[in-house]
Amino acid sequence: MSEANLVLDALRRIRRSSGVSLAFAGMVGPAATPRTQAVRLEHFVGNTRGALNGVSVDIGHGLGGKVIKVRRPVAVDDYLRTPNITHRYNAIIATEGLRAMAAVPVIVDRRPVAVLYGAVHTDSPLGGRTFDVLADEGRALEQRIVAERFTAGMGLVADDALRDRVTDVYGRLRRLERSLDDRSVAAQLEQIIGGLLDDDMPGDQTAVTLTPREQDVLSLAAIGHSNARIAEDLGIGVQTAKGYMKDAMAKLGATTRLEAVVIARRSGLLPG
């Protein structure tokens, strides 16, 4: 199955499971500027007016460009007004009538290959379920792309059973790598995972480490506690609790408490 078809399958599941108005995606490829990359939007499932089709999103700009730059999921309640992204593409988003939106990067062997988006036509927050669906589909798509590339590289006939086995092994290796406390062992495992695709490109991501207090604050936020309740449970001041939350969000590259919780879980820093 082609990578384009894998992306479309992921978008159909996102639309069906999350209830977003529009699920769409772009593959990462060369930009107009030499030696740069961009996300070209070309896959859509749901209600679209066509304004986004073929748009090239530069790295660092808009929502998709930001998630590629920070390599983490990002959500915004109102794309047109949020201060957390650049607004180069506001006219296009306004034409589509989209407001609340989330995006996740798809990263294969340390290289961003695509961005998955979920969006609605209101500024109501998307909620944790939508964010979880997007994140889950992003990770699953990574594994499916690896399976396709691995079998193709080995000259194997990629039947469903073989794809499933390679996808399962890759996913288990990734989960194990994220769970290891010994970073030297984790780095060796990362090299083994990269070897699946015979890619010797050096990694450029720095592991995020949260302090025990930051983990405590995020764990309580994950079950819906307010800052005041967190402070009370931990026996600290409200401003201190806010400070721990702010520091954790900065480390994780998150712009909201929800993003911080989801990213920490996906990184193995909090219980799932």
Image (cartoon, helix red, strand yellow):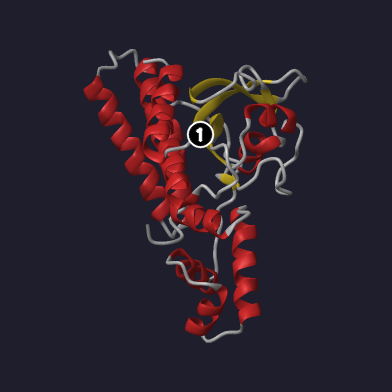
**Position of 30 relative to 247 (above/below):** above
Give SS at disc 1: strand
Question: Given the current orientation, which residue lies at the most extreme left position?
Answer: 161
**Position of 61 relative to 232 (above/below):** above
Q: Is residue 179 left or right of residue 43?
A: left
Q: Is there any visible trace of residue 272 in the rendered image?
A: yes
- Residue 94 position, x and y percent, is 69, 31
Q: Quadrant of residue 86?
A: top right
- Name the residue rendered at 63%, 22% in the picture: 52
Q: How many marks?
A: 1
- Name the residue rendered at 30%, 14% in the picture: 156
Which of these two is toward me, 13 or 3? 13
Which of these two is toward me, 174 or 142? 142
Q: Quadrant of residue 66?
A: top right
- Residue 59 position, x and y percent, is 69, 32
- Residue 214 position, x and y percent, is 55, 70
- Residue 133 position, x and y percent, is 41, 42
Question: Could you classify mark 1 by the number of other residues whose Cα lies within 10 Å: few (under 14), some (14-19), or many (20 or more)?
Answer: many
Residue topped by disc 1: 106
Q: Quadrant of the N terminus?
A: top left
Q: Is residue 107 left or right of residue 14?
A: right
What amino acid is labelled 1 in the image?
Val
Which of these two is toward me, 83 or 125? 125
Q: Is there any visible trace of residue 188 in the rendered image?
A: no
Q: Quadrant of the C terminus?
A: bottom left
